[in-house]
Amino acid sequence: MPFLKNLSLLFLLFIVSSCQSTALKVEDLDSKKVLFLGDSITHNGLYVSFFEYYLFKSGFNADVISVGLGSETTSGLSESDHPFPRPCIHTRIDNVLKETKPEIVVFCYGMNDGIYHPQSPERMAAYKKGVNSLISKIEAVGAKVVIMTPPPFDSVPITKKTVKKNALDFSYKKPYEGYNDVLRDYAAWLLTLDYPVVDQNGLLGAYLEAQRKVDSNFKFSGDGIHPNPEGHLLMAKALLHELSLSSARSIKVSDAGNLLKDTLFKKVHKRRSARSRAWLEYIGYTRGKVVKKDSVTAEEKVCQKLKVQILQSNN
């Protein structure tokens, strides 16, 4: 169909223009420890599982640890009616880096950083300060940085929940209807930084707009915030493309449902999920309550056995 061909062309043109060039290639991840940080989208981690799956399929054996945390920010801000003060990455980043010893760090923050309010100079400054501080701490341990802009906030599925710019208050329960304008500001600033940056906000937003020209009910997210499997697969595809994985262009976003049933993917996802949970709790965090476990050794042994099975299955 002409539309689908045009959509594919749109994707290729957009992804080439939205990702900054970098010397970091997918082969540089082989046998390296790759850490993922972020909020609830990374805590869900489906895009990380897709990412790791395609690495295995392409013959690369990276050591991926994903420790995204729901509700987290890098700005340190929180809404008045949030059930607990939002966790901030800066309260745990030192311990994260100390325990995981990453060589490459991929992070995706921003969705929660504007706390669902309209843009303000103060909130923008807090976001910039938080991101710059995070980069400095990552580089201080000798790790390389890869940045992903926050995926788009989509007000269409939740129009009854959103509020106007002149509302008395805003939060994740009552988000500003134009909140994606705030996320676009974050993305535009991130893209000026001298690091590899994958513009997930622009990419998913462009794909969403193109799909709605065919199906007005199309959506990536039921709650306007968290991407569905198609959205996560598109995020993984964009990141793999940034790292110059040759097969990334052939990944079809519409295959997300089939991938979830794939035997190899199920093993990769099971292992990634278990490992993420174990490391997150071992590193420790505060999210309404303090969570800290004493060891990750037992879980690592189980995950290592799963990795052997994955490598054998992929041969």
Image (cartoon, rainbow, N blue to C red):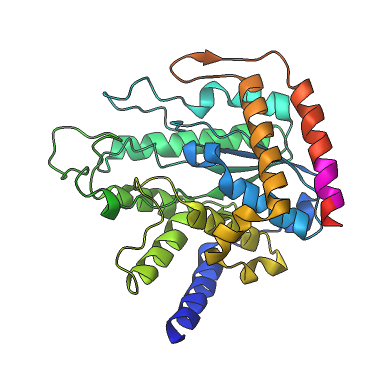
Q: Left of 223 or right of it: where is 162?
A: left
Quadrant (top left, top right, bottom left, bottom right) of the C terminus: bottom right
Q: Left of 168 or right of it: where is 236?
A: right
Determine if residue 31 is in view: no
| 51 is higher (above) or lower (below) than 132 | below
Q: Nearer the viewer, residue 255 or 196?
A: 255
* Residue at the image position 52 percent from the left and 31 percent from the top: 69
Residue 89 percent across, percent down from the top left: 52, 28
Residue span colored magenta: 307-312
* Residue at the image position 52 percent from the left and 26 percent from the top: 90
Q: Quadrant of residue 306?
A: top right
Determine if residue 182 is in view: yes
* Residue found at the very far bottom of the displayed protein: 2
Q: Nearer the viewer, residue 56 or 134?
A: 56
Q: Is residue 311 magenta?
A: yes
| 112 is higher (above) or lower (below) than 82 | below
Q: Quadrant of residue 207?
A: bottom left
Residue 99 percent across, percent down from the top left: 71, 24
Q: Left of 100 or right of it: where is 131?
A: left
* Residue at the image position 53 percent from the left and 52 percent from the top: 232
| 252 is higher (above) or lower (below) than 201 | below
Residue 298 percent across, percent down from the top left: 78, 22
Q: Left of 27 or right of it: where is 193?
A: left
Q: Is residue 3 magenta?
A: no
Q: What secondary structure characterizes most of the magenta part?
A: helix
Residue 219 percent across, percent down from the top left: 37, 58
Q: How many marks?
A: 0
